Image: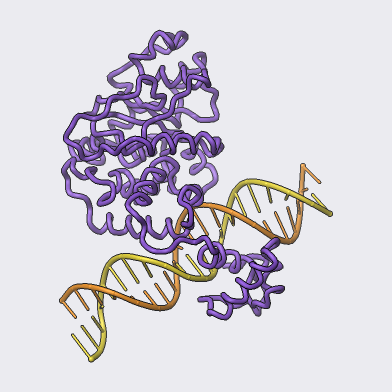
Chain colours: A purple, B yellow, C orange
Amino acid sequence: MGHHSCCNQQKVKRGLWSPEEDEKLIRYITTHGYGCWSEVPEKAGLQRCGKSCRLRWINYLRPDIRRGRFTAEEEKLIISLHAIVGNRWAHIASHLPGRTDNEIKNYWNSWIKKKIRKPVSTTGSSVTTTTASPPCSTAASDAAGLGHLQTPFSAAADQHQLDTFISQSLALPPKLGQESPPAPLPPHCPFFMFDTSVSVSPPSSLTSPSAHQLQHPFLTFTAASMDAPAYQLPPLVDSIGIGMGMVAMDCGLVEESRGHDHRHHEGTNGQAAAGMANGGGCCFGQQQQEEEALGQDQWDDESAQHLLMWDDDQELTASNLEAMESTAHSLLFMEPNDHA
DNA sequence: AAGACAGACAACCGCGACCGG
DNA sequence: ACCGGTCGCGGTTGTCTGTCT
């Protein structure tokens, strides 16, 4: 394994940082700023590579670092954000002031480890509280290497859009685990899936989406996508109760993972779809129950074929939906409540 | 008390993106 | 357009510490 170009010097030290090194780095950065990290070690008198200095500063020495246990609010936010953006730790960290991506990543991974070692009991109650257990999707999806697949926002999604989503979502009270019926869907919530096995909508009908908005969530999404001012944001994942169906996802990352990111598991569209439906951010109680009822294999083979997906770089217009229905791959839909 | 084990945390590594020459 | 340097990110590994047996 090679090292980074800036770390090739033999004298570069590795391993834990000593208090003296920390002090040198802090002193240098507080007086000079870091500017170019590759120059920092030399100027600060450290026998470290610039990368190591950067990491140390960002993850440990930065004055605004917040240490200590994650609060329940932070925990909840991490879960929600992870359901939205997947393993984009830096992105998640940007919404948690004082927390680093590394910290969040470690926290999440240790959590996942726990979940793998102690699988959630097989009742729908596994989604009762977010602090005691993340949405059923997360551990399973991460374990399957699919945790990054669930996001209604593409990799190129506007940060502002996501921020807006988050701020709106966080205003909603958590509903998970309540015995009361799930909260009603927002009338124009754009992000839903439908199961084509039970709700076949002739693509030709899509030419006038507004006429179907209230009865077909997909059409709502379509209309919203084509009509920016009418765009409405989805509810917080936590607010989506059992039986709600849910949820939208930009699965461009499926392609991404197949295309060039060898770090992620590969799989067929069907596997990806099944993985997402089972374990993606869209997976809530109903899917878990279904998984238990069907068995993993059955779900993979049978249920996945009813999931419709398309490329997110494919323009979403009424005219190309027909082609999507038969060939597409990358967004998937499911009828709300169908699997309840 | 001592060893085994698990969890938490720190750090490293490889890769992709970006940018300037 | 190409290339090399740099930065940032995510995955992984290593180390420390607390708990259990």
Residue A317 shows in the view: yes
Front residue of this view, candidates A174 and A315? A174
Residue B9 placement, left or right of A180: right
**Residue in view at x 55 percent, y 62 percent:** A58
The answer to whether residue A132 is above or below residue A19 is above
Write down the quadrant of residue A285 in the picture: top left
Residue A206 placement, left or right of A243: right
Residue A29 placement, left or right of A289: right
Task: Identify the image quadrant of the N terminus of chain A.
Answer: bottom right
Residue A137 placement, left or right of A26: left
**Residue in view at x 31 percent, y 59 percent:** A113
The answer to whether residue B17 is above or below residue A252 is below
Q: Position of residue A47 (x, y in %)?
A: 64, 77
Q: Position of residue A35 (x, y in %)?
A: 70, 61
Front residue of this view, candidates A219 and A132? A132
**Residue in view at x 55 percent, y 30 percent:** A313
Q: Position of residue A162 (x, y in %)?
A: 49, 37
Task: Identify the image quadrant of the C terminus of chain A.
Answer: top left
Residue A277 shows in the view: no
**Residue in view at x 28 percent, y 50 percent:** A131
Number of residue marks = 0
Write down the quadrant of residue A200 in the picture: top left
The answer to whether residue A55 is above or below residue A242 is below
Q: Position of residue A245 (x, y in %)?
A: 29, 29
